[in-house]
Every structure is written in structure tokens, then in C-alpha cells.
Image: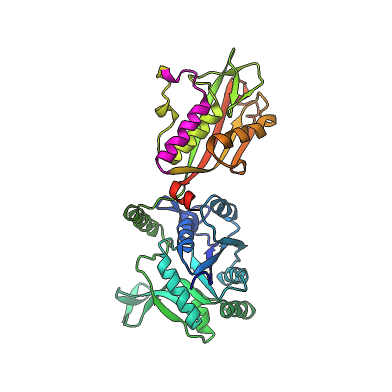
Amino acid sequence: MTGFAAAVIVAAGRGERFGDTGKVLAPVGGRPALAWALDAMEAAASIRDVIIVYGAHNEDVTRALVSTGPWTKVTTFTAGGEQRQQSMANGVRAVADDLEVALIHDAARPLIRPDLIDTCADRARETGAAILAVPLSDTIKRVDAGTIMETVDRAGLWAAQTPQGFRRTLLGAWCETALDDGIEFTDEASLGEALGHPVHIVPGDQLNIKMTHPEDRELIDALLRRRQEDTGVRYPRSGIGYDVHRFAADRPMVLGGMTIPFDRGLSGHSDADVLLHAIADALLGAAALGDIGLHFPPTDPQWKDIDSRDIMSHTIRLLRANRWIPVNLDATVVAEAPKVNPHVPAIRAQIARLTELDEGAVSIKATTNETMGFVGREEGIAALATAMIAPLEVSEAS
């Protein structure tokens, strides 16, 4: 049965050892941990909707990540609370009434597999409550003040993982009871146990590791990179670009593929379109294809006075030849003069045509340097750009 469950991804924890945005957005395998969890939910047949529970400290970054990604199942963002039970209640309340099952998954488990998600969802639908877990393999010691007090028989001991799945109405009632009665719990299964409901085990995966300590991140990173090598799967990437050109007399001012009325142009081997150069470098960088200096060296006379629109067209061809396609662009022009903002609509339209993007995926901004530095002294113009690209096969499939 497909599409009968919602996945509530808990991404509200701080995990301050992993940086300002916490461990769920820490990069592993070249991408934020949350992105890998979203991939698995996207691929799981049982999942129709995905709800993300964010923290106040990472809301903007989380929303930005999802807005530029390939995930179609994310329906809702909801704020987390001070305690897990509040975050969980907020997430479960956001699950649509027509879905039978709610799966709870920690974003800090990026190695979860789609097939295990589906198995857990099926078992939860059948029994009311089921979680992934693995039997303990290490010898367990009970310790007090640094001294071993006893060796614990590990027979029957399992380590709980996520996702943990429940009938939506059942989990919703549990969450409200926990809030009303002040019940604290470390996972949803323990809440069910406390309320007297049987919770069933679905054998999990020893590699479904939770990123708790910095050394966990190193192991998960290595496993994810190996997974990419084994499967050949590629994921969206981002790149940055920067360019600067001096003013020059007796040259037209070309910016973003448009000729702008001004008494000077920019100096360069090409037409010196500082904005298109920054964007091209961002796209090439995202694909690890070098920069425009590599592909259009200023020492080569064949590129003398080349139209930067041709540079951009060549860049797009290079991306496609390497099975990449642009997703979105965001660029800023830094100039005291000329005034760029009046020309931004025309520039956006031009860049959208050159990059084969919708205008809504192209952001162009302009600012000054507040009279500071070479830009402030009106010696030239600088431009910065960021770009997101996706595998061509993913874009074609969507």
C-alpha cells in the first residue's frame, strides 16, 4: 500500500557541538544531514507527506534548504518546542486527518533506508505501534562512579532507532496526554510503554547511526560517500562565484548580458561582463568544472572581446555535458555607479534566457560599498553569485 503515512522529521535540536545551525544541518557526505533523511522519505512508497519540525535557531536555513531541493513530499513546516514532547505534539498535529500512520524520524539519522521506512510504516498500520531497533552486540556494564557494578545480560536488549511508527490517532492522543499530565519521554515508544500500549520491534540496520558526537559525523560521512560511490547517485550541489573589473574609457558598460547607459565600460579580455562572469564561475564551481579562466584563458587571443553571453551558453553546455542543470541563481552587483537597480528586471529576464531558468529562479540584487574601497572610489565593479545545480536525470524525472 502506498502513500498512507506521514513522516514527521524532528530537526529542532541544537546540537551545539556541530555549529550554529545544529547537527541536523551539519554537512555529511557533502550535504546537510537533513537532506539525506528527506531523500529517503522521498523514495519511500509508504510516505505521502513530510512535516519538518524546526528550531528557532535553524528555521531560515531549513526552509532555504528545502526550497532549493528536489523534495516534493514536504508539505508543512512547524516550530519545535522547548521539550521533545512539545515538538512532537506540534509535528503530529500537522499530520493530515486522512493519513493512517505517522512516522517519527530524527533528522540526525541520515543513513536511514527507504525500505526500512516502508516496513516500519506497514507494521505500525497493522499493530498500532512499531519501531526500528537492533539487538545489542556489546557486553553491557552497569557502572557507578566509574566502577563496574555488574555485567548486564544483553539477551533481549535492543537499541531503539527511528523511524518509529504509530497509528496517527493513537500517537496524537498520547502526545496530548503527555502534555496535559507533564509526562516526559526520550522517544515515542517509551511514551506508548508508559501508557500501557504494546510496541513492536522491526529489525533495523546497524548502519542507521544517530549523529550525536562529532566522531559520529566522521563515520557517517565516510559511509555516505561510500554509498554514493556504490550507487552512482548524485545530489544537488551549490557553488559561489566572484569577479571584479576596473572601469575603462571608450568601452560600453555590459552587465548581465545587457548594455547599460554609462560613460564608461569595464576593462577585460572579453566584454568584461562582471555579473555573468560571477554567475558562470558559481555554476562551474558547483559542478567542480573549474572556472572561466580555465575555459576562456585571457592569454588566448581567440577569446579577445568575446561576448559573455557566449561564455554563459558554453557554461550551460558544459553543465549538461556533465549531466547537471541549473536550479536557481542569486547574485549581487556591488557598484557606486552606474545605478543598477533600474535595469534589474531586464537583466533578470536576460539571465533567465541564457541559463534556461524561470525568472522566479533568478535573483539579482544591487548595492553600493558605501564609498569604501576600490568600488567606493568608483574604480570598478564587483559581483558575487551563488548557484544551485541538480543532476540532469533528476530534473528530467521531475
Q: Is residue 151 visible?
A: yes
- Magenta stretch mostly in which secondary structure? helix
Q: Quadrant of residue 82?
A: bottom right
Q: Identify the residue at the far right of this view.
A: 342
Specify the segment rendered in magenta.
302-323
Q: Is residue 275 left or right of residue 236?
A: right
Which residue is at 35% across, 72% downward?
Answer: 146
Which residue is at 52% across, 56% downward?
Answer: 71
Rendered view: 4 above or below 359: below
Q: Is residue 135 magenta?
A: no
Q: x, y (%) of residue 174?
A: 58, 80
Q: Is residue 54 visible?
A: no
Q: Is residue 303 magenta?
A: yes
Q: x, y (%) of residue 269?
A: 48, 19
Rendered view: 397 above or below 334: below
Q: Identify the residue at the far bottom of this view.
A: 196
Rendered view: 312 above or below 389: above
Q: Is residue 226 left or right of residue 391?
A: left
